[in-house]
Image (cartoon, rainbow, N blue to C red):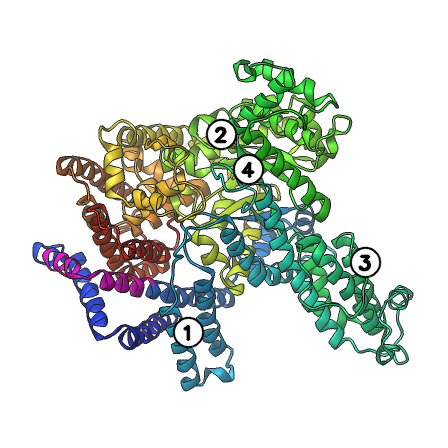
Amino acid sequence: MTPLTDDRLRDEVRLLGGLLGEVIRDEGGQDLYDRVEAVRQASVAWHRDAGAADAARLEQLLGELSLDQAVGLAHGFAVFSLLANVAEDRAGKRRAREQAAAGARADTPEGALQRLAGTGASTDEARDLLAGALISPVLTAHPSEVRRKSVIDRIAAVSDLLDACDQNDLACAPEVLMAGLRRQTVILWTTRLVRQAGLAVQDEIDTVVSFLERVFLHVAPAQLADWRRRVGAPELAPFIRIGTWVGGDRDGNPNVDGGVLTAAFRTQARAALRHYLDEVNALGAELSLSGSMSAVSPELAALAQASGDRSPHRADEPYRRALSEIYARLAATHPVLTGQPAPRAAAFAAGPYAGPDVFRADLAVLRDSLVAHHGAVFADDRLTRLVTAVDVFGFHMATLDLRQNADVHERVVADLLKVAGVCEDYPALDEEARLALLAAELASGRLLFSPYAAYADETLKERDILLAAAEALRLFGPQAIRTHVVSKTDAASDLLEVYLLLREVGLYRPDAPETCPIQAAPLFETIDDLRASKPTLERLLKEPSALAVARARGVQEVMIGYSDSNKDGSYLTSTWELHEASRALLEVTDAAGLRLQLFHGRGGAVGRGGGSSFAAVVAQPQGTVAGRIRVTEQGEVIANKYGEPDVARRNLDALTCGVLLASLRPPADQTFSERHGDTARALSRASMAAYRALVYETEGFVNYFRAATPIVEIAELKIGSRPASRSASTAIEDLRAIPWVFSWSQSRIMLPGWFGFGSAVEGADLDELRAMARDWPFFRTLMQNMEMVMAKADMTIARRYASLVPDRALADRIHGAIVAEWDRTVAAVLAVTGQDALLAGQPELDRLIRLRMPYVEPLNHVQIELIRRRRAGDDDPRVREGILLALNGVAAGLRNSG
């Protein structure tokens, strides 16, 4: 970051903070403003010196807060976090422009193509790779994103006002700008940042669709058009395919059923069709070309002639007549796919489109006629952008994955087999017996389900959602649903059970298994599952049914989980085991003559695979990308990476560039795995031993965790639509990885992102580790991500969270162990990197984090105070609201905490 960019960032933070201060004073009163300032100053003084007097002053201020004041203070700092993020995002856009002007970065299209050329790879090779590529960010709903859509919209409005100044818009006159910013700040201040009622799945659907509609629907087609120009391929097929889990992920979420899946597709289709209708209407207003003054193609003439538009005013305007017909057919399609009439009725009735391909073909007739008779000025215009949007989004908008736990499938299949008289006790069978039975059933056309028999509610619910999936595929086509992810996969039978259930609803045909539109994809999550992933996939691909589906696609998808493997064995161990499992899985698919398509289950926090997507893709083992990758985008990261068009475009390009570089780089780049593999394995073993000794083997650790983090509040306040734990148990093993990581992030320990590394490095060859950090993309990315999360950790604030533990001896013992490993890890990181401070090698990131922390830390202190009150028995709804606000504000300030 140049000094100029840095200064402007600080200026914008001060501008927005100053406006917020004025609004707090005017709207909330001078007393609230004074208390906000007092707590902020006391927090800074306490953090700087951590002396007894500073601690006492901070405790006194917090203890004196009334509930209304505590909630107001949390609200104020949370709003400031959101406004500061606007300034930071804008600084990022300026920095990207500066770096592009100074010399192309590797994560930009120019930079990636230049680097490929430097290794001998041509633009033609990039074009050929993209022609068969699949790059899919998959949006998922998780409790670390607790902001309402109303809040996201207000933040976007503030950003738009400031962006207008960058473009020398007339609205940038100082008095106009300040009035606009103040207006938005007042609205934001008086808007509830968090929901009063618990989150429903439809709320999560609406949030995801708002990003699809406001950002992706415009950015993804523009990005595709740009890459088509860069690689000289005007008809390059879409390689960015946006995915979603919301409405299809029922693993541990009892609220997802067939009705919810149907609602998800209807909501997505409404957004897509509304956009298409608006664009077709706008084109009708624009394309007023007269047939008497302009030649048209025979196809366009036929389309206009077949139109139901009989207006005499458009008798010699073939393009408008054709567009009237297209609009009428789209309007007729709307109720078919959404269950609601079109927002603006057509002037006449017409039949609905059978699918997006027919709609696209009609649009192409107009475009081709315009280009043929009027030249290239019509080759890249509004009509062409609409055609590209249909290429990318169809009528379904985003591909929806199904996901369910393998244990559920086992129970459902067991119920079906038992009621049908095929097998009395399926769970008692060993793996080979299960596979033999499932193979026999998959070869048979006889269905197990009978409408006259009685089944468990779980069985009926699973059948209903698969029936809804079959209907969605009929309405929206094969891109609507492509994958059924199986959580907790540890055997090949877990995948065949899915195909058996798909057979029950007509999606898997024993006489033509290759036509099955949905592929069962294993999700390997724990360390043991990752280590066993190779034999599991080998056994699966020996089954004719699974192999037929994979060969029809040429691909076998496998999902690998960053979250549970981290919770199971430490950040270092998880990262290494994922690396090794990826290489092993590639061997399996290569042997089967298939391509491997890895689906990376990453979260926002480093403990869940977070960090730079570009760096993560480039660091993948050789051959495991090969033009195809899917990556989950979760929690607050969706808003941070895709909250506005410029930022979203930059992130989609970075993901594309990472795929190109990882796929086309010279093989020599991956010799590090062989050279340093033994060292990495030794580090992994030592890290896992240290981590498990604390988390799973230390007496009282669960009690410490539940008291020294907001995990209880996260679970009880129902931030997301699904439970925080898979069962009623309080065991770490049963806790979902998302609230596990989110809790440690909120308490500023960030334990899943670093614990164990210090112990692992003790006694290791530092010279080799330094070489690994310098030359090996895998290890370099691991180190950079760990530094980033450690820079956001704060052991002094963590000590205040530890004060929430009723057993002081337990608190001192476990907090002391955590701090001791922290000290070892900081020393290890500095020794390996040769730096004198964390992030010394990443000064831009260091400055951004330092700028952010002064307004995050007061939220931690308020959160602690309100948690203390709640646990003491204060059940006032305002306590709940204040805790949610503090959770929201800390997540916004840390930016990748979930």
Q: Which residue is mark 1?
A: 184
Disc 4 from disc 1: Cα separation: 40 Å
Q: Amino acid at mark 2?
A: Lys
Residue 544 screen position, x and y as percent: 70, 23
The image quarter containing residue 339 is bottom right
Q: Which residue is mark 4?
A: 403
How busy is the neighbourhood of tag 2: few (under 14 within 10 Å), some, or many (20 plus)?
Answer: some
Residue at the image position 24 percent from the left and 35 percent from the top: 703
Disc 1 from disc 2: Cα separation: 46 Å
Q: Secondary structure at mark 4?
A: strand
Disc 2 from disc 3: Cα separation: 46 Å
Disc 3 versus disc 1: nearer the observer? 3
Q: On residue 351, which mark appears?
A: 3
Q: Which residue is mark 2?
A: 488
* Side of 238 relative to 707 (left or right): right
Residue 807 screen position, x and y as percent: 15, 37
Disc 3 from disc 4: Cα separation: 35 Å
